[in-house]
Image (cartoon, grey):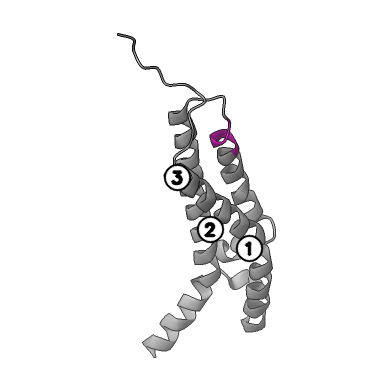
């Protein structure tokens, strides 16, 4: 009886492809985030000085930070989509891209809404 060996050319399952698509959408969201960040930056500048904003808000509303966060997600996806590596490693790369993309997009969202939460907290305290 022969041992069953895993071929590096095994195919992704539907769940693998769903993770890949979700990670890809997070990349698209991160690439488009500077447009939304600019509108938030304009709104925050109308309320006061940019220097008084939290660091995470200044980073999230910048043009380069969301794009820099997208790079590791794209690299992880590229490694995950290489057919020459074993399926388990490809899945690990896709899961990593999915987690990184979700965390990066969430970080940018939290950064843009920090001043809004601060204003809401000040209004509620009064």
Inspect the magenta stretch and tell me whether residue 81 lies in it. yes
Answer above or below: position of 101 versus 12.
below
Which residue range is magenta in the image? 78-82
Answer above or below: position of 4 versus 59.
above
Q: Nearer the viewer, residue 44 or 21?
A: 21
Residue at image point 55% right, 69% down: 112
Find out whether the residues at labels 1 and 2 contact each other: C-beta distance under 8 Å: yes
Residue 102, x across and y down, in percent: 48, 54
Q: Which residue matches tag 3?
A: 14
Residue at image point 42% right, 45% down: 15
Inspect the magenta stretch and tell me whether residue 45 lies in it. no
**Counting other residues with Cα less than 10 Å from the Cα at mark 3, is it few (<14), some (14-19), or many (20 or more)?**
few
How many numbered dots are placed on residues in this image? Answer: 3
- Nearest to viewer (mark 3 / mark 2): 3
Determine the secondary structure under disc 2.
helix
Instruction: Specify the label residue 105 is tagged with.
Output: 2
Residue 108, x across and y down, in percent: 55, 61
Residue at image point 64% right, 68% down: 37
Q: Residue furthest front?
A: 1
Determine the secondary structure under disc 3.
helix
Q: Nearer the viewer, residue 28 or 66?
A: 28
Q: Residue furthest top?
A: 1
Q: Nearer the viewer, residue 114 or 55?
A: 114
Determine the secondary structure under disc 1.
helix
**Counting other residues with Cα less than 10 Å from the Cα at mark 1, is it few (<14), some (14-19), or many (20 or more)?**
many
Mark found first going from the N terminus, 3 or 1: 3
Residue 93, x across and y down, in percent: 49, 36
Q: Which residue matches tag 1?
A: 33
Q: Residue furthest left?
A: 1
């Amino acid at each position: 009886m022969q041992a069953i060996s895993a071929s590096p050319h095994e195919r992704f399952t539907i769940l693998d492809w769903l993770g890949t698509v979700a990670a890809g959408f997070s990349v698209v969201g991160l690439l488009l985030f500077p447009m939304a960040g600019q509108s938030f930056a304009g709104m925050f500048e109308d309320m006061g000085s940019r220097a008084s904003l939290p660091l995470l808000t200044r980073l999230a509303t910048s043009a380069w930070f969301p794009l820099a966060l997208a790079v590791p997600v794209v690299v992880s996806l590229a490694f995950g989509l290489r057919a020459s590596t074993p399926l388990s490693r490809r899945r690990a790369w896709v899961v990593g891209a999915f987690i990184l993309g979700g965390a990066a997009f969430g970080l940018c969202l939290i950064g843009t809404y920090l001043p809004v939460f601060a204003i809401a907290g000040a209004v509620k305290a009064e």
